[in-house]
Image (spheres, rainbow, N blue to C red):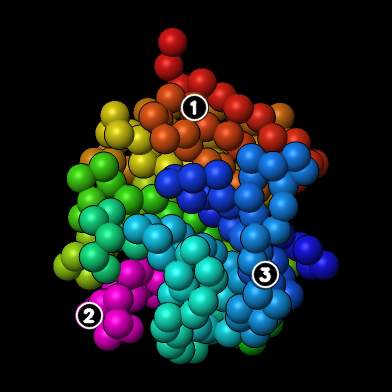
């Protein structure tokens, strides 16, 4: 890639990975080769940053700064459908847990639910994750990460709230649980102690708890029960966290740090 690698998606059906960058380039890789080899390449998959990708049933979904959502054949990267989904940056895209719907979320904290043909089903806002700053004349916030509940109808959306200076990262981490099937906010999850930064990663564990990773004024991990506002456990991290991923079995999390390190943490045993 010539630009920053903004997202990676793995194909669960075989040894393939998809990488996307800030120049709008999308690449499919065969990752069991040494070194990994390029299978397909799309230079202008989006106009500018590709922020997020998702994979389901042989289809690859992507969203980016051009406000578009694109559905592709993952075997060839051929575009099947593309539509202007938002009037600002698309930060997250996902297939619903059953694969029947498409979800997208943007810089303004709005979530939209779509039919696979691009027909809009519903739209709702998550007010806690967005603010218009009159001093900077800019929208601040957005859904920086999200994770579905094990049973499917709820989604935990992560970002920052109470932002007073976006350029300096002055705000507080927040997770908002929403019912995407009804289009309504259910609950906000907040740390007990004041922390300055952004919730960059969230994962809903199949055991029922929610993990959030934040960075800004240092790094933190928090663990919540979904029906409680404040966390049941907090763990200080060695530096600013910028992303988090949960293993398929829910037994481990990988945290990416601002300094270029990734650390893997066991959650049990």
To which quarter of the image does residue 112 belong? bottom left
SS state under label 2: strand
Q: How many angstroms separate mark 3 from mark 1 (CA)? A: 32 Å
Q: Residue at x 45, y 70 (%)?
A: 73
Q: How many angstroms separate mark 1 from mark 2 (CA)? A: 35 Å
Q: Which residues are magenta?
A: 102-123
Does 119 appear in magenta?
yes
SS state under label 1: strand
Query: Which residue is outermost to the left?
Result: 182
Q: Is residue 124 visible?
A: no
Indicate which disc, 1 or 2, sits on the residue closer to the N terminus.
2
Q: Is residue 149 positioned above or below 164 on the image?
A: above
Instruction: Indicate which disc residue 41 carries.
Output: 3
Q: Is residue 203 positioned above or below 5 on the image?
A: above
Residue 22 left/right relative to 131: right
Q: Is residue 185 visible?
A: yes
Q: Residue at x 45, y 89 (%)?
A: 84
Q: Residues within 10 Å of mark 2 (few under 14, many from 20)?
A: some
In this view of the protein, which residue sits in the foreground, 184 or 145? 145
The quadrant of the rendering that contains the N terminus is bottom right
SS state under label 3: strand
Residue 150 left/right relative to 176: left
């Amino acid at each position: 890639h010539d630009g920053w690698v903004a997202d990676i998606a793995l194909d669960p059906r075989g040894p393939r990975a998809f990488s996307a960058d800030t120049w709008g380039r999308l690449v499919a890789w065969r990752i069991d080769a040494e070194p990994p080899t390029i299978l397909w390449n799309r230079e202008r998959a989006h106009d500018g940053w590709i922020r997020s990708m998702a994979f389901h049933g042989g289809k690859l979904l992507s969203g980016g700064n051009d406000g578009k959502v694109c559905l592709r054949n993952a075997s060839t990267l051929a575009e099947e459908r593309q539509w202007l989904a938002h009037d600002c940056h698309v930060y997250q895209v996902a297939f619903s847990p059953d694969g029947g719907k498409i979800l997208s979320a943007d810089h303004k904290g709005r979530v939209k639910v779509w039919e696979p043909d691009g027909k809009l089903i519903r739209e709702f806002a998550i007010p806690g994750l967005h603010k218009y700053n009159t001093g900077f004349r800019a929208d601040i916030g957005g859904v920086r990460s999200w994770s579905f509940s094990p049973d499917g109808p709820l989604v935990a959306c992560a970002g920052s709230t109470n932002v007073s200076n976006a350029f300096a990262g002055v705000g507080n981490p927040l997770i908002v649980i929403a019912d995407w099937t009804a289009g309504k906010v259910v609950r906000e999850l907040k740390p007990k102690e004041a922390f300055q930064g952004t919730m960059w990663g969230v994962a809903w564990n199949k055991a029922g708890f929610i993990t959030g990773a934040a960075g800004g004024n240092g790094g933190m991990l928090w663990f919540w029960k979904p029906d409680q506002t404040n966390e049941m456990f907090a763990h200080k991290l060695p530096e600013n966290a910028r992303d988090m991923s949960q293993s398929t079995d829910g037994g481990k999390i990988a945290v990416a740090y601002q300094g270029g390190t990734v650390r893997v943490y066991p959650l049990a045993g």
